[in-house]
Amino acid sequence: MRRAAEERGESLTSFIIHSACAEAELTLADQRRFSLDAEHWSAFVAALDRPAQPKPRLRRLFAEPSLLERQPS
């Protein structure tokens, strides 16, 4: 690692931090990017294009005060 840091003209600490950040981005990339075959892509786009459906339970949930908004008893 020291040699690689020297090759880049970075301190060892800087090299390790940059390397760790790059690895973290690669690890999380699959959670942000995905690929689908044509059939699944069409189904995905159709689901996005459908009008939103009312969800009464979700509406009730958002109407209730959150734990942070509730007053202590």
Image (cartoon, rainbow, N blue to C red):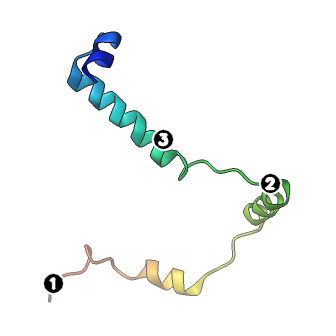
For disc 1, the neighbor class at 10 Å (few under 14, some 14 to 19, many from 20) is few
- 64 vs 22, nearest the viewer: 22
Left or right of 4: which side holds 45?
right
Report crowding for label 2: few under 14, some 14 to 19, many 20 or more residues within 10 A (C-alpha): few
Quadrant of the drawing holding the C terminus: bottom left
**Residue 24: x and y, percent?**
40, 42
Q: Which residue is mark 3?
A: 26
Under mark 3, the amino acid is: Leu
Toward the viewer: 62 or 13? 13
Give the alpha-carbon distance from disc 3 to disc 1, as whole Å: 44 Å
Measured as percent of width and height from the top left, residue 35 is found at 70, 50
Q: Quadrant of residue 36?
A: bottom right
Q: Which residue is mark 1?
A: 72
The residue tagged 2 is 37
Q: Earlier in the sequence, mark 3 or mark 2?
A: 3
Circle 3 crowding by C-alpha within 10 Å: few under 14, some 14–19, many from 20: few
The residue lying at 55 percent from left, 50 percent from top is 30
> Hey, what amino acid is under mark 1?
Pro
Identified at 84% across, 54% down, the residue is: 38
Dot placed on the residue nearer the N-terminal end, 3 or 1? 3
Q: Name the residue rendered at 45%, 40% in the picture.
A: 25
Residue at 28% x, 29% y is: 16
Q: Measured along the vertical axis of the image, is residue 38 above or below residue 50?
A: above
Placement of 58 over or under 23, stated as above or below: below
Q: Earlier in the sequence, mark 1 or mark 2?
A: 2
Viewer-nearest of discs 3 and 1? 3
Residue 15 sits in quarter: top left
